[in-house]
Image (spheres, rainbow, N blue to C red):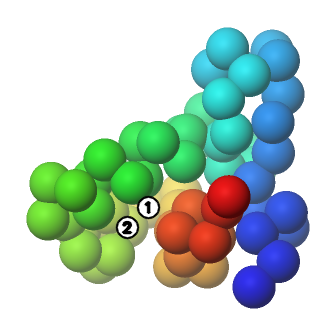
């Protein structure tokens, strides 16, 4: 997966942390939700602006 299609780093957003393009949701946010045992479906239910592909890109981000 090419996570660069879904993730950007912009110093103007979230203090330069990697975020999902078109949102202010950071990769760290998504990974934290997984750490709290949220599923992809639960994340999308809470944040319907996200897609499954965007969430997966967070897992591949290095």
Residue 11 placed where, x, y %? 82, 18
Residue sitting farthest toward the front: 62
Seen in the picture, residue 50 relative to 56 is either above or below; the reply is above
Q: Quick one: which residue is furthest to the left in this view? A: 37
4 and 41: which is toward the camera: 4
Q: Nearer the viewer, residue 44 or 13?
A: 13
Q: Which residue is mark 2?
A: 44
Image quarter of the N terminus? bottom right
- Picture residue at 63% right of the left edge, 20% below the top: 14
**Residue 21 falls left or right of residue 33:** right
**Residue at image coords 41%, 42%:** 29
User: Against 13, is 55 above or below?
Assistant: below
Tell me the SS state at disc 1. loop
SS for dot 2 = helix
User: Tags 2 and 1 in contact by the CB under 8 Å rule?
Assistant: yes
Image position of 53 with respect to 37: above or below? below
In the image, is 9 to the left or to the right of 18? right
Residue 51 visible to an observer of this rendering: no
34 with respect to 17 (left or right): left
Residue 41 visible in rendering:
yes
What percent of the width, then of the height, locates residue 23? 65, 41
Residue 17 figure quarter: top right
Mark 1 Cα-neighbour bin, 10 Å: few <14, some 14–19, many ≥20: few
The residue tagged 1 is: 48
Within 10 Å of disc 2 (Cα), the crowding (few <14, some 14-19, many 20+) is: some
Q: Nearer the viewer, residue 41 or 16?
A: 16
Quadrant including the C terminus = bottom right
Quadrant of residue 4 within the rendered picture: bottom right
Distance from label 2 to label 1 (Cα)?
Answer: 5 Å
């Amino acid at each position: 997966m090419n996570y660069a299609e879904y993730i950007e780093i912009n110093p103007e957003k979230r203090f330069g942390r990697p975020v999902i393009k078109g949102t202010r949701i950071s990769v760290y946010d998504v990974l934290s939700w997984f750490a709290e045992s949220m599923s992809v479906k639960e994340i999308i239910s809470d944040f319907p602006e996200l897609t499954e592909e965007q969430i997966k890109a967070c897992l591949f981000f290095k």
